[in-house]
Structure formats: structure tokens, C-alpha cells
Image (cartoon, grey):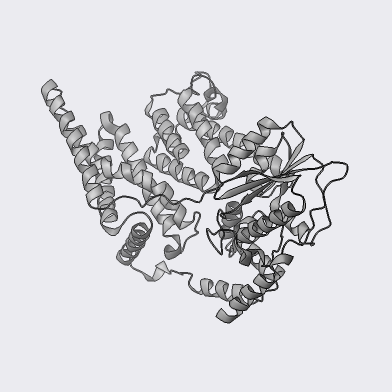
């Protein structure tokens, strides 16, 4: 989001500056039109233009939704600065910087696509929505494959959900509505989106009032040449918020949804802060016209107390965002242990067996094997493979980081006894993490019993354990063992209890 704000900031700075046309006296009007390269030089490509280029490359490289939000911002700024933005001395340098920024961001993507690396799921979602197709999502496809692999019959469920969702699609015939009805319907749709996604109803009502007041303030500022640039900034911010709300209510309005509703709030909330301030900023600019020293000191003091009062009111009225929600990506223990291993052992002498989180940290230092693939091999579903290194470290979570089905749970025999379907997808760790970690935990305990001298605990605390296996690389250990045979009676009791509760 900061790149989108940066893009707007540097565009404002660039458009605020007075720039003269590059004129060649002997040129005809047609020839001067095609002399575009005269605007692509140091005279026009200053630091602000280069920062625009950098911000464009960042928003495209970050995420598809960020790029769309940046496009909305550029459209808003362009509309606010008409007709100035269409003048060659502004349009050509900004267009050049935008194209070059896009090239910088797209070239690495093109290289990876050429190598067969697919787009992120968000891009697939966007293309399917634009084409008018129903996007099931990578997660839905994985769930279907998982159910099939586990032999669970879920036929028909996906089709029912799809048809149900298709029936809820809103189709609006604006031709049968009067202008007043259209305005009321659009206004209610925007308010419904904003009050359920951004803030509560009271805060959104104040936001919409500030948008209306800000629009009037921007018109008044634009009419005066001295304050025109300020009014254009006001107008651009308001137009951008309006566009975000329009696409936030896209389903109700019957238009293409370019950004997921929940994601729009990410871009709308920072912009809303500016909108709340526009009427106050306008008032202080008018009040600050008198340059008396004592009056200016009073005005600054008053603005300070007003800011404190507004912040207090926001807190007391509950107009604050909810606490941040986050998913922990990995445990600190894995980072600490891996750093110690890289310092202690020579390169390429060890293999790390863990979930995919440690993969990139191991590159250029040692080898990595997916824990999910390893357990699938141990369970006899793959051909036996061994490790070519002297040292093998097994990273196992005693308290599962997160499991889509079971949540944050401790490893347990009831999870280890379940079937694990290895699909070779990173989402194995999202949907089956409790099963993978539990099976790995009980496998490690059994393996330690059999080879206590060469299979030891390298690190352990209450949530994490790392085992180290030391082996002869010319005669590596066979990891395929029956690690649940000693728990046969307990597993039967667990299965019997589960059948009784169903």
C-alpha cells in the first residue's frame, strides 16, 4: 500500500511543477506532435518522475490487487488534473516512466513464465472473473483432490455450491430505473459495502459527508489559480475513494469485480484518513490567510488540540480498526536451529527434513527434503530413498503451527493414525499438517529407540523438537519402519471411540 501512496505523492509533486513545452520554431504542428523524444530527457525526467517509475514497478511486482489499486489511483489523479495532465510536457514523461516501471516489473515474471512457473492464484482469479467464469480457487481444487485421494465421496457438493452462488448473482437493469432510483440504489450499495467492510455505519456516514464537503472544497480551491493544485489533490483523493467503493460494491451494482471485497478495505482505509481531514484542512487554509505572527501561533496551538481531540473521539466512539489478524508463518525455533546448523557444519554435509518454510534458507548451504514427501515414503507409498549426507536433521513441531481442519493442536496419536494423502502441493502442510507432524513425531520416537547412538535429540523445547541422524553415507539408514505397531491397541480404541461419536 505504501507504494500506491508513494505513486500518488510523486505524481502530485510532478504535476504541481510548471513545465514549458519543448518548442522547435521551424516545426509544423504535425511534426511537433511526433517529436515525443524531446520530452524524454533530464529536463523532464527529474527525481519525481523516476520515483514514479520505481513505484509503478513496485506495485506491479507486489501483487495483482496492488497494481489494480494503483491504476485506480492514476485514473483518479488523471481526472482531477484534466486537462493539464494531457499536455505533452506532463503526459509523455509520466507515460514513459509508467511503461518503463511496468517493463522492470514484468520482465522477471516473463522469465519465470518461460520456465514454466505458473501465475499466483490471484492472477488466475482475476482472469477468470474478467472472462465471466466462476473461480473455484486453488484451495477448492486441492480439497477435491484430497477428498478423492482419501476416498471420501463429495460428488455433487461443488456443483451445488456453484449453482447456488450463480443464483445469487445480481443482475441490474438500469434502463427500467429512473435517474433518482439509480442514484439511491448506487448510494445504498456503496454505503452497504463501506459499512460492512471498512468501518461501522456511523464512521462511514461521517466519511461520506466528508467526501461531499471535500468535493465542494476542491471545486472552490480549483476555481482559484493560487490554490488550484491543492484542490486537485483533494479531488483526486475523493475520486479514488469513490472508485474503490464502486468496485467494492461491484456485485450489487452488476459490474466486473476486479478486486476481492475484503482486499479493497486495505486500500480504502488509508485513503479514508485523508478524506476525514480534507474539510479541516480547507478550513485551516482559509483561516490561515491572515499572516499575523500571534494569530499563526494561536492557529498552530488550536490545530494541535484539535488533533488530540479528534484522536480521543475516535478511540472513545470506537471508530478504530479491529486488532490485526495474522497467521504465524513459522516458529522462531526453526530459524534459530537452522542458523546454528549453518554455522556449525560444513556446506553440503547435511540435509534438512522439514516443511517447505525452511527450503530457501537451506539453499546454498545444504540439502532439503520435504517432510511430507519423506513421511509418504516412510508410509510405503513411494519408492524407498535415502539421504546422501552424513548428517540429517528432522524438524518436527510438537505443537502444530496451524492446521486447516484441527487448528493449533499438539501432536497426537489420533492424528498419526489417520491416512495421509501426499499430493506434492505446499497445501499439504495447510490441510494435513497435524497428520504429517504427528506421524513424523511418532516415527522419530520409534527410530530413536532402534538407533539410540546415531539418532539423537539436537534441540527440544515445549513446542518444537529437532532430531539429528548421523550415518555412514556409503551405508545410509533405511527410514522405512513400522512406527505405530506398538500403539495398535490404542489406535483401535481411538477408532472405536470415533465411530461411537458419529
Frontmost residue, 488 versus 349:
488
| Image quadrant assignment for residue 360 | top right
Q: Percent x, y for residue 402? A: 55, 56
Judge whether 185 appears above or below 331 on screen.
below
Q: Is residue 403 visible?
A: yes
Residue 502 shows in this picture: no
x 26%, y 41%: residue: 277
Please state the horizontal and vertical placement of residue 470, each as a whole percent of the image. 77, 42
Rendering quarter of residue 151: bottom right
Quarter of the image that includes the C terminus = bottom right
- Residue 197: x and y in percent read 38, 57
* Farthest right residue in view: 474
Q: How many marks?
A: 0
- Pick the residue in front: 371 or 16: 371
Q: Residue at x 48, y 44 (%)?
A: 71
Residue 438: image x %, image y %? 64, 59
User: What residue is drawn where x is 42% and y is 22%?
Assistant: 20
Q: Is residue 241 left or right of residue 466?
A: left
The image quadrant where one finds the N terminus is top left
Give the left or right position of residue 83, taking residue 304 as reference: right
Which residue is at the front of the view, 421 or 352? 352
Q: Is residue 145 left or right of residue 174?
A: right
Question: From what the image shows, is residue 188 above or below residue 347?
Answer: below
Q: Residue at x 44, y 60 (%)?
A: 250
Q: Is 410 placed above or below 236 here?
A: below
In the picture, measured across the screen, residue 291 lies left or right of residue 478, that is left
Amino acid at each position: 500500500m505504501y507504494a500506491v501512496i508513494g505513486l500518488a505523492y510523486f505524481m502530485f509533486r510532478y504535476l504541481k511543477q510548471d513545465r514549458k513545452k519543448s518548442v522547435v520554431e521551424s516545426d509544423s504542428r504535425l511534426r511537433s506532435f511526433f517529436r515525443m523524444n524531446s520530452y524524454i530527457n533530464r529536463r523532464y525526467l527529474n527525481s519525481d518522475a523516476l520515483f514514479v517509475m520505481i513505484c509503478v514497478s513496485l506495485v506491479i511486482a507486489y501483487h495483482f490487487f496492488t497494481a489494480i489499486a494503483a491504476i485506480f489511483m492514476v485514473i483518479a489523479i488523471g481526472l482531477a488534473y484534466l486537462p493539464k495532465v494531457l499536455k505533452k510536457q506532463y503526459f509523455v514523461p509520466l507515460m514513459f516512466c509508467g511503461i518503463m516501471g511496468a517493463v522492470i516489473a514484468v520482465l522477471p515474471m516473463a522469465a519465470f513464465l518461460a520456465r514454466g512457473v505458473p501465475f499466483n492464484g490471484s492472477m488466475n482469479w482475476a482472469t477468470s472473473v474478467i472472462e465471466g467464469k466462476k473461480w473455484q480457487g486453488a484451495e477448492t481444487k486441492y480439497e477435491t483432490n484430497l477428498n478423492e485421494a482419501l476416498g471420501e465421496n463429495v460428488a455433487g457438493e461443488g456443483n451445488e455450491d456453484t449453482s447456488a452462488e450463480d443464483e445469487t448473482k445480481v443482475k441490474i437493469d438500469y434502463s427500467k430505473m429512473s435517474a433518482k432510483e439509480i442514484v439511491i440504489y448506487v448510494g445504498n450499495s456503496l454505503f452497504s459495502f463501506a459499512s460492512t467492510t471498512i468501518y461501522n455505519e456511523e464512521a462511514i456516514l461521517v466519511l461520506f459527508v466528508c467526501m461531499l464537503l471535500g468535493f465542494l472544497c476542491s471545486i472552490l480551491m480549483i476555481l482559484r489559480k493560487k490554490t488550484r493544485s491543492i484542490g486537485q489533490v483533494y479531488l483526486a483523493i475523493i475520486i479514488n475513494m469513490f472508485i474503490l467503493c464502486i468496485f467494492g460494491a461491484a456485485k450489487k451494482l452488476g459490474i466486473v469485480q476486479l478486486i476481492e471485497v475484503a482486499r479493497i478495505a486495505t486500500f480504502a482505509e488509508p485513503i479514508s484518513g485523508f478524506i476525514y481531514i480534507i474539510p479541516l484542512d480547507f478550513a485551516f487554509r482559509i483561516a490561515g490567510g491572515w499572516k499575523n505572527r500571534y494569530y499563526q501561533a494561536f492557529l498552530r496551538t488550536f490545530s494541535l488540540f484539535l488533533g488530540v481531540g479528534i484522536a480521543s473521539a475516535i478511540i472513545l466512539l470506537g471508530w478504530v480498526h479491529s486488532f490485526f489478524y495474522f497467521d504465524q508463518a513459522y516458529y522462531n525455533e526453526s530459524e534459530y536451529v537452522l542458523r546454528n546448523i549453518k554455522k556449525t557444519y560444513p556446506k553440503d554435509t547435511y540435509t534438512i527434513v522439514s516443511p517447505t518454510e525452511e527450503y530457501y534458507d537451506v539453499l546454498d548451504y545444504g540439502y532439503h527434503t520435504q517432510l511430507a514427501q519423506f513421511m509418504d515414503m516412510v508410509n510405503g507409498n513411494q519408492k524407498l530413498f535415502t539421504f546422501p549426507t552424513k548428517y540429517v536433521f528432522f524438524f518436527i513441531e510438537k505443537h502444530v503451527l496451524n492446521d486447516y481442519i484441527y487448528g493449533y493442536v499438539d501432536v497426537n496419536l489420533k492424528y498419526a493414525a489417520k491416512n495421509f494423502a501426499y499430493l506434492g502441493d505446499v497445501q499439504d502442510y495447510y490441510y494435513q499438517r497435524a497428520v504429517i507432524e504427528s506421524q513424523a513425531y511418532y516415527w522419530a520416537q520409534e527410530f530413536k529407540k532402534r538407533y539410540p547412538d546415531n539418532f539423537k535429540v539436537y534441540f527440544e523445547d515445549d513446542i518444537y523438537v529437532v532430531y539429528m541422524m548421523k550415518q555412514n553415507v556409503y551405508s545410509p539408514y533405511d527410514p522405512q519402519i513400522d512406527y505405530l505397531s506398538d500403539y495398535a491397541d490404542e489406535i483401535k480404541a481411538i477408532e472405536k471411540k470415533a465411530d461411537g461419536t458419529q
